[in-house]
Structure formats: structure tokens, C-alpha cells
Amino acid sequence: MTIRRYTLTISCPDRTGIIAAVSGFIAQHGGFIVEASYHTEQEAQRFFMRQEIRADSLPFDAAEFHRRFSALSDEFNMDWQLSDSALKKRLVVLVSKQDHCLDDLLHRWRSGELQVDIPCVISNHEDLRSFVEWHGIPFIHVDMANKEAAFQRISALFEEYRGDAMVLARFMQILPPWLCQRYPGRVINIHHSFLPSFVGAKPYHQAYQRGVKLIGATCHYVTDELDAGPIIEQDTVRIDHGDTVDDLVRYGRDIEKTVLSRGLRYHVEDRVLVCGNKTIVFR
Amino acid sequence: MTIRRYTLTISCPDRTGIIAAVSGFIAQHGGFIVEASYHTEQEAQRFFMRQEIRADSLPFDAAEFHRRFSALSDEFNMDWQLSDSALKKRLVVLVSKQDHCLDDLLHRWRSGELQVDIPCVISNHEDLRSFVEWHGIPFIHVDMANKEAAFQRISALFEEYRGDAMVLARFMQILPPWLCQRYPGRVINIHHSFLPSFVGAKPYHQAYQRGVKLIGATCHYVTDELDAGPIIEQDTVRIDHGDTVDDLVRYGRDIEKTVLSRGLRYHVEDRVLVCGNKTIVFR
Amino acid sequence: MTIRRYTLTISCPDRTGIIAAVSGFIAQHGGFIVEASYHTEQEAQRFFMRQEIRADSLPFDAAEFHRRFSALSDEFNMDWQLSDSALKKRLVVLVSKQDHCLDDLLHRWRSGELQVDIPCVISNHEDLRSFVEWHGIPFIHVDMANKEAAFQRISALFEEYRGDAMVLARFMQILPPWLCQRYPGRVINIHHSFLPSFVGAKPYHQAYQRGVKLIGATCHYVTDELDAGPIIEQDTVRIDHGDTVDDLVRYGRDIEKTVLSRGLRYHVEDRVLVCGNKTIVFR
Amino acid sequence: MTIRRYTLTISCPDRTGIIAAVSGFIAQHGGFIVEASYHTEQEAQRFFMRQEIRADSLPFDAAEFHRRFSALSDEFNMDWQLSDSALKKRLVVLVSKQDHCLDDLLHRWRSGELQVDIPCVISNHEDLRSFVEWHGIPFIHVDMANKEAAFQRISALFEEYRGDAMVLARFMQILPPWLCQRYPGRVINIHHSFLPSFVGAKPYHQAYQRGVKLIGATCHYVTDELDAGPIIEQDTVRIDHGDTVDDLVRYGRDIEKTVLSRGLRYHVEDRVLVCGNKTIVFR
């Protein structure tokens, strides 16, 4: 991802001529389309598209793109945004004591695979300070004794560090409704079950008791209904009768970090568009 | 599976010396063990084992085995059974209109992959008569207008045809509690979702509405609680936002027949032992 | 797939403006695009696209589409074709004695899942005659004693029955180079290994000897180099040390029919575009 | 894995009575078997078994076990070993510049998931020194300018640090035959393809050129034939035409570390028994 790109994402009421209008606009300015994806959501009668355009193929910058594109976007009643690959998204990461998701995320970040900035890591425990600080990333401890005050502080830190998205990398705390509502489509959680099975606490214990033959993990946007937000990515792994709850937890860690990292990549690359409580993911 | 085998399955309270006692008994009579599997269910403090023994390596038949083994089984308080690969299990198959599971099952039967007898196929519709009869298998239509009478007839047919197991190959009818209770561990269903998600009717519609990223199927023993019996086998398949409910149904058919056929094979080969509401599957 | 559609597939040298030109042409005639996919093959500097258009949204038929589109296709130097969902493709199926792929294919055909015509099934054995004829499909036995004459006959039958594609559903015979060359991109084979591993005969034995931990199957277009043509679809399944060659064959059957059916669907729905020895598959 | 266990692994010529003799020996001393696995390798006519026994259930220690078991092992001509979970295996890890496998391995080590000692990490580059040393593990740079001298030094270091196994975590150097032969079954490599496809250099480029639809990774014991040693574990992941070589490398990293970590766990827990060029893996 070395070539600078603009990523244009659009959703609007479905009708004929949208692709022609948008691709016509881009072609008229010499824009070189690297990747193009389209989808019509039948029930909602809504159209979704995503286009990656080489920045150097356009004769103007993002601000000018906004100006010129607005006539067309008004005509089609579009919700749209243009993101610039040169401006990395800022992920504020929240963790508790378990570090498998954090380790995975920081490795992808320091290897350059995940093209983001991580302005800080917030935790309700001190355990992971040394590991985070080795990466040169500020580590902020927030005391959860007073939950309301703690979440006010977390929200303030998110603003102060200008976070684009808040990543709950096994944070193990339920966010208050006001916080969920303040950042719709910007708080990303990894839940350690194949939702909608095993909502809430101790999903691996629930899975063990039910005797399922696969377990899973779910990456989703957080809404004010617990574990019920739009699903970005999921996966499952086979277990069998010989596996204890501890084995499930161990298998689960691997799938949690895989699913979170895929979900994050889709989010960061503007591949996820939300329609009601569902997502369109242009992979 | 050309060599005749006895399959010995045992469950008993856990203690030391069980394997030694059983394998000692077999060795003492020159028995050649082809496959051996063991499992301790920690919570239940119960031990489970399965052994396949070459029939020609033992100097006596199954009846004599029963006589001689009973002292040992009494000592360890065993639930046990010995099955003979020369006596094929008899599967009575119930279907409705959809034939993907039936087609799959009959193909495995006629190719010799699934070593069972199918004494009859029962259906509440006439649609699949010709296909079943082409195989030389009796096809019996049961009118569901009076449900109670219909299930009485099904139960009577199952007895009359001396069924060992009843296979609900997308039968689409809920069995009455008395029927479930009459044949515990002998009625096998394929449910078209990854249980415990999407219990009951129209699971693919439920999955579509929830926006999950994988769908699944579950093969389980039927109990009198709907879709809540011991799970034998499950699997999932990836879908995406572009898939309609019809696509889910199409993907689902493939996974339903795969999961049912695997679950049936495990059952038929005495690989499934039930412990409470869970299964041990010695693959 | 009840609504009639035109599927437009295009490949041409890559440059800016292709999407705009094509979608502009469609929009200008009121065409409603149901599905749109694009891909640039970097090394070959070639652009590929596929569009499904509702037939009833266009004011003219396929012949008129050809006439009007030709100016544009000339300008961009396009290889292109338009297929009409109302005209089913005709698959001539070749089999030997094993019927798992044939059974799967005919089930999908008679359930309406696979929207094709099957004008005849050709075999070098008589074994599957009754099963094929039960479906009302002509079964033609071709004696392979004289291979050259046999393949001349097969080619003549393919022409006589106006086949669009020849499907080798475990035919177990190597086609002569002249036959491969006569129908490029129209002869589809299922090979029972994960190519390029285990080319040629007895791949399951080869896999067993090598001690691999997964086995696979490959659906590919046939070229005059054995098992080396463009790959359409592949998949793998886990095995372990307990599995014999017979077990591998059994697992393999399931994956062969799955992979063949997916590959066939992609081909039949014009989702496969060939670029050199690789395929673009617009799923 | 908090309870101390002895793991007994045995291979010997196949005959009747082996399980009875071994489990009889264990039962006679009150040994509590936690896990038991058996396998007969048909072609080789060899029997393999693995048993985990609670250490506190036996009235003697490992040395005494050796003494007492030898009569029985002689009688059956057994190759066998007993390992003690209290004595962690020592893994010497070799890396180059890429750190995804190393990061994964060290995370599992510091979280306690992988119960081993890592006495040192050896590399032909300095890049990963800081990360390794943060873990408190010695990092040793070996100059590869003179390959023969370098490998002599590596072998000496392996001895000096009393390594039980040498892990090539993307070391990217071909070991000389004498080194491979010195430590049979003790040098573990992760190869970035689904072997036997794409042996040697740049497997992702080879996979891209061939147009395969899945890529894989293989964990195997190193022998003096390149990428041809006994396979411990493999897995594959789906790619498509839109993926560049860089995408393959990215997907590949995830599967490499997963496959290596599984293979290592099997090895460390004495779950892998070698038979010729194949492995039995008692999962």
C-alpha cells in the first residue's frame, strides 16, 4: 500500500445510473480506479459503493474533490466520504489484563501491516504497561472503581488523543449507553463467541456446557444493546469432546485475534459500510 | 470396512484400572484391537471407551462375549454394548419435499460408503416416491392432517420395519414429546443453523436478518426440547453481504448434507456416546 | 435466478475510463445493473469486468445490444460476450464408473439449482446407464478399445448434442491434445488432488505416501498439458495419521463434488475469465 | 497443565496384547491415566502409543519407572521414552529479519501457553535484538559470511545452551546435511507453502504464478532433503484473483505462525511420533 490513494465510499437510494455518474466523474478528471466494489441492499433499496483512486491520477486534492463532487452527491442524495491513505486512522486501544489481541495488533502495527497510528493504550490494569511502552506508545491507567467517572475519563482521553476509532481488545468492561451512542460505527469490539450464540459473560463456559462442536469469535461495532451491534467479521474453529474449558479459551485466543485483526483492517481501509444493523464488507 | 469387527463401547464411573481390565480381558482371549479410544468426562467423573476388535481374532461369538464380559462389567458398573459389523444398522428415513439430504444419503448407501440397511423412507408428501423406489426401497406416504395419528403411524412403521435409528432428513415436522422420549439417542435430526443460534423455524431468514458472516448446520439427537438435544456434529460456511436468503439456503443445503452424513457415520459406527446433554465422538 | 438477465463479460487492455464508458452505455439505455465486478491483472496490464443487467430494463434485445455496443468495444479493443440467462448452457458430461460427482451434478440439475441443460451423458462403461436414464437423459456408451476412434466419436457427439462445455466428472481418461485444443476454456475437469501437488495417477496414494495433513481437489480447464490448465476452484480437507488410503478416497469424494459443483456454477454463470494460465473468478 | 504428568510414548512391532501389558503395568502401580492414544501403522506393521499419567498417582519417580518398565519394553522390543512435565523442553529459536513467527512464539511463551524454556534466540541479523532482550532472553548474532563456520557455531551454541529442539522460525537459510543428520526429529521448520507444492525459494511467487486458489504453510522436521522431511502440521487459506503477491505474503504470515505454533505444541507435548518419513500426531 505504498501508492497514495483516495478511497471514496458512498451509500444512497438505489436507482439506475449511479455507477455511470460516479465513474464518469472520475474518468472525466483522469482518475485511475484501482479497486471498485458495488452492492445493492435489496430490502433497504439502498446502493453502496467503494472506489480506490490513485491520488496522483487526479489533478486536484481532497478538498477540491469535495467541492466538485457535491453537485453529483446532492443529485443522488448520497451519504459519502473520501479518505486519504496518507492520513492514517488513529486507533485508541482499550485492554484489560489479557494481551493476546494487543500483542497481535501491535505486531501488525510495528511491522507496517496495519497502517494506523496508535496514540495511546488505555487499561484498567497496570499489567501491560511495560510491553506497550517498549513500543513507544503512551500507556494510560484508568481506575474503574467509579465506573461512570472512568468512562467519562476514557471518553475525554479518546477526544484528547483525537481517536478515530476505539478498539476494545478484550477490555472486559461493558460500555455505558451514552458512550456507545456518542461514537456510532467507531467503537469496535471482539466478542469471544460466534454471535448471536453465547451473548454476555463467560461464553467459553456456555459453549462447553452446550456441547457445541465449533467455537467462534465475532468482531462488531458496539451499540447500546450488549453484543448486538453490526457484525464486521466472524470465524469458527473445531473443538471436540476432549477439550476442556481451558482448551476452548486457548483455541479461542487464536481466533479472537485473527477475527479482530481482519475486522480492523476492513474498518481501517474503509471497506465496511453500515446498513441498519448489518454491514457490507467490500473485501 | 471389509473385515468383520466387534465394536465395544463402554461408559462407567471413572477410576484407575479400567483400560487395563478391559484390554487385559481382550488380550487374554487373543483379541486383536484395531482401534481404541478413551475419554474421561471430568465434571461427570465418568469414563468412556470404544474399541474395535477383529471378530476373527476372538475364539467365541458375540453372545459368548456377553456372557464372559459380564463379570468385569459388573465390577466396574459399566453401561456397555457390543455391536457386530456384520449386522447392519437399519435407518428409517423421514423426509418432506426437499431431497438434498436424501439424495446424499441414498448415494452413500448405494455406493457402499454408508454400511446400513434402509428398510423404508417415510414422507408426508408424494414428491420423492419415484426417486426412492428407483433404489428399490419402499416409500410410505403418511398424511399429516391428523398429527397425532400420523406420528402414531410413524412410530408403528418404525417398529414394523425394525428401525434402529430414525433419521429426520429435513422432515420439517416437530416430533411430539412422547415420540422423542420413546427412542432416546435413536432419533437423529439435521437442523439448518449453527445451534444454539437460530432455533426453530426459518433459521436462514434469522441469520440473514442478524447479518452473521457464517452460517451453519447441526446434526443432533432429538429430545423433547426443540433443537436442544445432544449435538453430534456441526459445521459452518462463509457467506457475505452479497448473499440473499436464497443464496444462504443454497450454501446451507451443502453443509446440511455434509454434517448429516458425518453425524450418521459416527452414529452408525458406534462412535457417539452420550453423557448428559453432550456427546463424546470418537472419530 | 428467476429474473432474466444479460451477463456482459469484458477483457481489454487496461486504461482509465473503461468503467465509465461501459456503465455510461448501460445507463444511457436505462439498464439496471444487478451485479458488477472489476479486476485489473497487473502483470498482463489487462482489465476484466462482468456485469449482470436486468433484461427487462433494456429497450432492445441481445442482437441489438451487440450492434450498438460494437463501436465502444472497438474503441477499447475489447474481447467481450453477452450471455442471456434465458438460454441455458448445455453441458455434456463424461463419466466412468464412479458416480459421486455425477450424482451431485444431476441432483443440482433436477432441483433447479444448476440452471443448465444436460443433453447427454457419455461413458466408457455401462454401469451408470440406469441412473442417468431415470433422469430422462440419454446415456451413450463409447468403447475405449480404440482410443483415437473413441475420442473422435466423443468430439462428434459433443458437436451433435451442441454442447457448450464438456464436463469430465471423474472420467479417468486422458484427452488427446487435439481435443483439448479444439475447445479451449470449454472442457472442465475435476482432479482429485490439490494441484500442483500429485499430478497424474493415484493422487490419494501419493498423498498418503507423502504424509500430508490435508488433501484437496482442483477444478480446472483442460489444456494439452496434463493437470496444468487454468485453475477455477480448489479446496482442502483435514486428514490425520489414522486415515487409510480408503479414508482419503472417501473424504476426497466429498471435496471433489463440492469443488466441481462450485467450479461449474462459476463457469455456467460466466463468472470465470481466463488470463493466460490463470483465472479471474467473480464470485 | 498445572498437574504434573509423565508422558509415555512407545513404538514397537505390532502384535496383540501391547495395550493390555502397558495399561496393566500402569494399573498395577495405581497409575491414573489422563489421556491415552493408540495407532497401528499398517504398512510398517508398527504400533504407536502415548499415555499421560498423573505423576502423583505413581509410587515412584521417573528413574524408577525406567528401571521397572525395562523388562516389559524388552519383551515387546519397544522404542520408548518417558517425559516429565516438570522438566520443560528447551527450544533454541533461529530467526532472520521477519518476526511474525517469533512474536507469536514469544507471546505464547510469556503468557504461559507454551510450556518451554527458550535459552536463547540466534539470528543472522541484528534487527530483532531489542525485542528478544525485552523478554529477558539472550540474543546471539551469528555472521553468515562463512556459512560452514556459521553453522558450526550454531551447532555449538545449541549444545552449549542444552537445546532440546531447534526451531527455524523463518530462518531463511538452508541447513547443511551434517547438521540435519546430527539432530533427527529435533529441528523443526516452518515452510511457507502447502508442501509438496512449491518447494524451495519464493513459494508465494510460485503460488501466484500457478494461479492456485488457496495457499498454505507446512511445519516439518528438517532432514537433509530440502523441504521433504516428515510433516507435522499443515493448513491452507483461501485467496482469490484480486490478491497480489504481497497479499499472499500477508495471508501467509498468519497461517505460518498458526501452523508453527500448533506443530511446536504437538512436539513439546510429545504428541508427535515419527514413522519413516511420516508422523503420527496424537492430538
Image (tube, coloured by chain):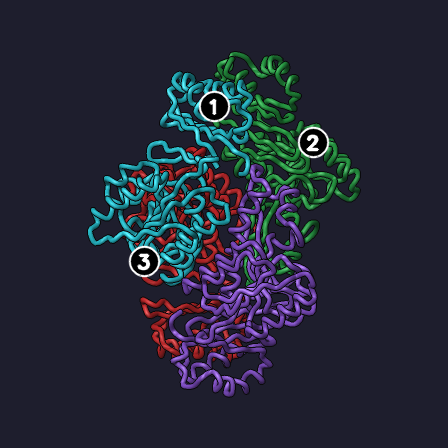
Chain colours: A green, B purple, C cyan, D red
Asked whether disc 2 touches disc 3, contact meaning CB atoms under 8 Å apart, the reply is: no
Q: Quadrant of residue C245?
A: bottom left
Q: Is residue A177 above or below residue B14?
A: above
Q: Amino acid at mark 1?
A: Ile
Tag 2 secondary structure: helix
Whether residue A104 can be seen here: yes
Note whether B278 is above or below A84 in the view shown.
below
Task: Tell me the SS state at disc 1.
Answer: loop
Task: Locate residue C183: give its quadrant.
Answer: top left
What is the CA distance from the residue labelled 2 to the residue labelled 3?
A: 73 Å
* Number of numbered discs overlaid on the protein picture: 3
Q: Report, in whole angstroms, how far the alpha carbon at label 1 lies from the one at label 2.
A: 30 Å
Relative to D100, residue B17 above or below:
below
Residue for badge 3: C126
Q: Nearer the viewer, residue B202 or D164?
A: B202
Q: Quadrant of residue A144?
A: top right
Q: CA distance from mark 3 to mark 1?
A: 60 Å
- Tell me which amino acid carries mark 3: Glu
- Residue B185, given in percent of the width and then of the height, sits at 60, 69
Residue B84 vs residue C57, the one in the foreground = C57
| Three-letter code for the amino acid on which mark 2 is drawn | Phe
Which residue is at a point 59% across and 26% down the rendered structure image? A9
Residue A3's mark? 1
Disc 1: CA contacts within 10 A as few (<14), some (14-19) or many (>=20): few
Write the residue at 60% across / 56% down.
Answer: B191
Q: Residue at x 35, y 45 (%)?
A: C189
Q: What is the chain identity of the residue bearing mark 1?
A: A
Is residue C107 shown left or right of residue B42? left
To which residue does mark 2 refer?
Answer: A158
Please state the horizontal and vertical placement of residue D21, each as a whole percent of the image.
Answer: 43, 79
- Please determine whether, in this image, residue A271 is positioned above or below residue A95: above
Nearer the camera: disc 3 or disc 1: 3
